[in-house]
Amino acid sequence: MKLSNFLSLPVVLASLLAPATVAAEHTSNWAVLVSTSRFWFNYRHLANVLSLYRTVKRLGIPDSQIILMLPDDMACNPRNAFPGTVYSNADRAVDLYGDNIEVDYRGYEVTVENFIRLLTDRVGEEMPRSKRLLTDDRSNILVYMTGHGGNEFLKFQDAEEISAFDLADAFEQMWEKKRYHELLFMIDTCQANTMYSKIYSPNIIATGSSEIDQSSYSHHADNDVGVAVIDRYTYYNLDFLEKEVREPSSKKTLGDLFDSYDESKIHSHPGVRWDLFPGAEQGGRERLVMDFFGNVQNVEVDNAGNSTQLAEDLLLLSKKISELRQQADATEGAEKNATTPQPIKGSHMVRKIGAAKVEADHRSWDKTAMGVWALVGCSLVWWAGEHMQPSV
Amino acid sequence: MLLSLLFLIGSLATTIAISALADSHSDYHEQLLLRPLHPSLLLASFNFQSNTSLTSFNQQNFRYFPRSLGQILQHANTRELHLRFSLGRWDAENWGARPWGGAREGGTGVELWAWVEAETDDEADQRWLTLTNALSGLFCASLNFIDSTRTTRPVVSFHPSGNHSNSTLSNLHLLHGTLPREVVCTENLTPFLKLLPCKGKAGISSLLDGHKLFDASWQSMSIDVRPICSPGADDCQLQITQTIDMVLDLQRSKRPRDNPIPRPVPQEELKCDTSKPYHSDDTCFPLDAASQEEEFSLSHIFGHSLRGTCPLANDGAPSVCINVPHAREVYASEGAREEKDSSGYMRCFQLSPDKDFDMVLPQQEISEKAPLAQPLLYAERSFIGYGQERGGVQAILTNPSPTDAVDFVYMESLPWFMKLYLHTLKAKINGQDKDTIKEMYYRPALDRKRGTQLEVRILIPANSTLVLTYDFEKAILRYTEYPPDANRGFDIAPAVITIGDVSIRTTSLLLPLPTPDFSMPYNVIILTSTVMALSFGFIFNLLVRRFVAMDEADQWDVRAIRLKFAATIRRLARRFKKYEKIQKTE
């Protein structure tokens, strides 16, 4: 008996260790897709983001897990000759705006403050769920940004900018608050690689379109739209995703994706940062593209097969709930009892200053007459005083 | 066996009873009305309406009522809601009265007003905040920008259209907000369609397509939720009405979607007026095509034909109607039953449930036209004045009726940075000062806290024109208060004109504010910093350094200091020794 117990110890240990190995996997996928440029001539930045949006949606991330930030309206822009559409290719084969699109932050809402609040979940309680990043420590997040940037900054709407330090601190805060499991940061802007140089939080793979002092270029223009429609780096990323990652079962890795970058085509030097990732480059290269661009959910069942345990747990839980309910009822009742003696009806009297009725003044002539009389009276007194003075 | 059969029958009976119960309490119907407008335009009015009993709504038992919206309304204690998304200008001179009498229409951008139940004003504000934020998430619009500066509490312009019990009526707070800058696009249509029972998959909603809707000359989407209590029934109904009205340009909508850029008509296809004396091979006066009715079909203008009927629409009313004279030829696809009404200008089609429906109106020479309803009032509003400091607003309101005077309420809600001078408010009728303002409600603006709200009740006599003018001053904003595209100007919400149940909205205005060159502050900061650094450095140098001649400088170098220091220590040591010696000698 004793011996058998001893023999079963490794099994118990293994079962204890099992969650630790499972913990290496993620259970949800989220995407934060941000364009930071306003104005019609930045059409391509919105097209970049919308292309990514279509791709992650195609690979299975639902609208509820995609945060899309579009700072301007291109589809219904009066300058757009193709109303209700955004194209990222001059062949105009795919309408990126389509019939079904949900934009979470748009127009003036796309600010540095809102972006950082979104990442760190520092939002007011009235913020709707669709505008929040409801991730946990088992969520893989794809953060894609595009716009106009420079050395360690990215402009938002041509009015403000986010620095590489702000971004690094936001990611650190996310890590501290257990808001991600692994994060892929991708940025397409001029001098993009400087934007991820300050990140110091673990489990992040970062990639950018161009080195310091290098510009990122647009790929091509559609002469009927009248502006460039997509950037080179994003174009070749999408090219890979469309051609190689055709279905959610794809086994292509991030290594394959980054190896596909051809500097002679992209016209800049894309960079990758592996050092924050466990296993560094070796570990990162083996990660599947679908771990970030798709929605592969690993279901995790605790104590599978042990149904009596589950039943017991449920029983315990229901007992706990009923206990808590009773407690809540009791406190509520106490509160009610405490508050009933002092009615706060007076608060109803505090009304906001509403619009007041403006009354026309019908007695203006009377008032004028009174004023004239007062003046005449004063001058009479003065005149009388002047004349009644005893002459010396 | 028998038992199971009994059980089956029993369950069947209960299902039927339940469905019958549900049917008696909830219904849904939809209708599309088409009305050709001059010249070569088409007004398409979509109407979707469903009723749910208030008790089942309160029990969270949603059938036709969209759950997503219902839960928001319950959470924010909203008893009546009106939400509008609009774009474009209704051309009343050519198109006549507005659809639904303007009741299902909002100002350019987004407009929202609701009756919120709350004990206090602060509580109402809190619930309004919850409501606007929740709706902003649901409809992908920046409704969360309706803050205290854009919220008003109109006194006489809006009245609840639903039936509210007296106990709730006393606690209802009307709040109204507009976003004239907000764009209306496909992402707003997507959630709108998701609220419909058939979700745009079947029935008339299958015609709705963002590519056509947002190419319209004028369009308005509306959502109204209100309680309805009939006097006899003990249970009230909650009614949700969704409408979409759009004025489509037939020429534009017939262009192919992949190639919408117009090219000049080839010369051989041009129709010229040959009666003109200058008509020749290279000169052409285009013929007026007004006498010709344009050819169009549903599939042409909406991109595809109508997909059957929505199976949930259970009232049996015809779902597509067109307002053309009976003499106009209309060909409908097979399976549809045509019904002409007695007025001579309306015909409706009863569709077959599972067949696609299309309707073709060929080109036809016809002089008879369906009569247009004349609007009660024509309204236009524009800026007057010049300069960066002050300006004025002029509203021209024309009563076209030769016999009836019109009593209306004119409401303006202006942003705080447009400071209205109330004493300059003047109303002139046919160019003469007359006492036409009957009543006036006014709430002045507070900087950065709330905007101006002005409601004026005016009586305009028959066949006259009223010109309402007022002056205002433009405030100077703080650096961070300017939007990223400040040079575009600031949108001013449309004025709302209420005549009983009819409402008219003017167009929005674009107010240019004095906008600084935003790079200039940086120049100033850099220059000032340089000047300050130079002067500070100079003064600091003067204060902490000692200036000596070249030959004296040797005495002040480090070696000299060290030597001096060493000498002092030696002197002190010597003195100490001397002291010791003196002690010893004693």
Image (cartoon, grey):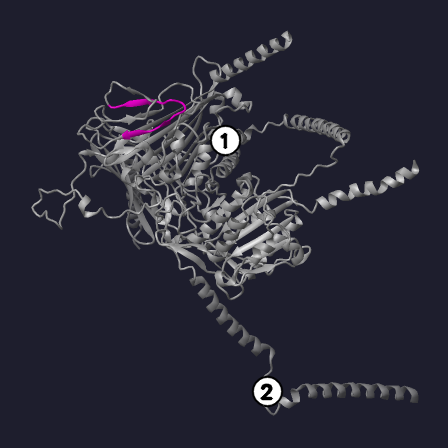
Q: Residue visible at 49% across and 16% down?
A: B235
User: What amino acid does circle 1 point to?
Assistant: Leu
* Residue extent of the magenta highlight: B345-360
In magenta stretch: residue A50:
no
B467 vs B45, left or right, is left
Q: Residue visible at 62% across and 28% down?
A: A342
Secondary structure at badge 2 equals: loop
Spot occupied by residue A50 in the image (x, y as percentages of width and height): 47, 47
Q: Chain of mark 1?
A: B
Spot occupied by residue B194 in the image (x, y as percentages of width and height): 47, 32
Q: Examine the rendering and report whether any part of residue B151 can be seen.
A: no
Q: Residue visible at 52% across and 40% down?
A: A63
User: What amino acid does circle 2 point to?
Assistant: Val
Q: Quadrant of the N terminus of chain A?
A: top right
In the image, B35 versus A13, the foreground residue is A13
Mark 1 crowd level (few <14, some 14–19, many ≥20, 10 Å Cα) = some
Q: CA distance from mark 2 to mark 1?
A: 84 Å
In the image, B205 versus B45, the foreground residue is B205
The residue identified by callout 1 is B69
The residue identified by callout 2 is B548
Mark 2 crowd level (few <14, some 14–19, many ≥20, 10 Å Cα) = few
Q: Earlier in the sequence, mark 2 or mark 1?
A: 1
Spot occupied by residue A290 in the image (x, y as percentages of width and height): 59, 47
